[in-house]
Image (cartoon, rainbow, N blue to C red):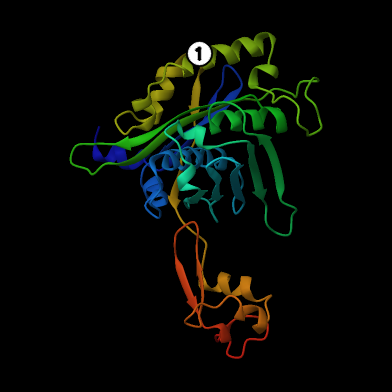
Amino acid sequence: MTLGTKIAWDDTVLPFQLDNVDMRGRVARLDGVLDGILKQHDYPPQVEALVAEMALLTALIGQTIKLRWKLSLQVQSKGPVRMIATDYYAPQAEGEPAQIRAYASYDAERLTDGTPFDQVGDGYFAVMIDQGDGNKPYQGITSLDGESISVCAEAYFAQSEQLPTRFNLSFGKSSEPGNPEHWRAGGIMLQSMPKASPFVSQTEGDGVNLTASDLVDGEEGENWNRVNILLNTVEDLELIGPSVPPTEILLRLFHEEAPRVYDPQAVKFGCTCSEDRVRQSLSIYSAKDLEKMTTDKGRITADCQFCSAHYDLDPKTVGFDAENPPSA
């Protein structure tokens, strides 16, 4: 592996298609993006692993949305990890990188020595898409069943989108020679594109979650099973990289299925918070309301949960009856 190879594929999502079996997918590698997300916080290892998994899912799913759209994934639970939230901001124009941010909320005293997913209790996995331009946001949810967040995401696609979907993810701390230990993640998302099964319920509820196998049968089912058996042979180090390029992984796994690749999408860590956004969020409050929000030093402060940015404002400059609003 050369340095150029590492730079070329780290923090990218590579779309592909398997022409012989009518399937599509993405291969994602996260390095600097994941480091940018996790270094903003001092999470325990179990929480770091959950955030890494969510960030990787966000990169894989987000690559499908249109320019200037926003994808958000959320886990809400009654467990020690109460919430995990991620945002994917699609590029503003062709050729620009997408941006990802993520954070988690948890009760440190309730964390156990169990697996990362053991820290998530009853709750739901949610997918939200904001198309902008005044369009009504889309939202779909599924319960937190299974042994990982990625399994919940597969159930969401089967239940809400009627799309057989499989995720194979790997993430952990990398110890490359000459580099400090840091988190890396890699994964493959695979989707079949059949018509919806007539047995798929069109209503939402508390029924049993569907799986990909519920949506395919006959030749389509045979193709789905065969490709998934091939996907099961991928090794963790192949997914995480950086030694094996994603194109080589696809050829090794699916060479008989005629893999076709498209232009990769670059991703980076990024946050949209700003002082102007904080001021806008406070613009609905009166001076009397703002008095209840001031610190002992007579200031209004706010911290971004995603990037830990700190904002310190004069109460007289915010609210709908600000005395000294900042100049435009």
Q: Is residue 163 above or below residue 268?
A: above
The single residue placed furthest to the left in the displayed view is 178
Q: Position of residue 1 (x, y in %)?
A: 25, 32
**Residue under numbered circle 1:** 229
**Quadrant of the image occupied by residue 283:** bottom right
The single residue placed furthest to the bottom in the displayed view is 323
Asked whether 313 or 213 is in front, the reply is 313
Name the residue located 22 percent from the left edge and 43 percent from the top edge: 179
Q: Position of residue 173 (x, y in %)?
A: 32, 37
Name the residue located 47 percent from the left edge and 51 percent from the top edge: 97
Q: Is residue 157 left or right of residue 298?
A: right
**Quadrant of the image occupied by residue 49:** top left
Asked whether 208 or 259 is in front, the reply is 208
Q: Is residue 113 left or right of residue 63?
A: left
Q: Is residue 31 above or below residue 159?
A: below
Total tally of numbered discs in the picture:
1
User: Is residue 192 visible from the viewing direction of this image?
Assistant: yes
Q: Is residue 303 above or below residue 154?
A: below
Q: Position of residue 19 (x, y in %)?
A: 56, 21
In what quadrant of the picture does the C terminus appear? bottom right
Q: Secondary structure at mark 1?
A: helix
Q: Residues within 10 Å of mark 1 (few under 14, many from 20)?
A: few
Q: Is residue 140 left or right of residue 243?
A: right
Q: Kindly identify the amino acid type of the residue bearing the numbered disc 1.
A: Ile
Q: Position of residue 309 (x, y in %)?
A: 44, 65
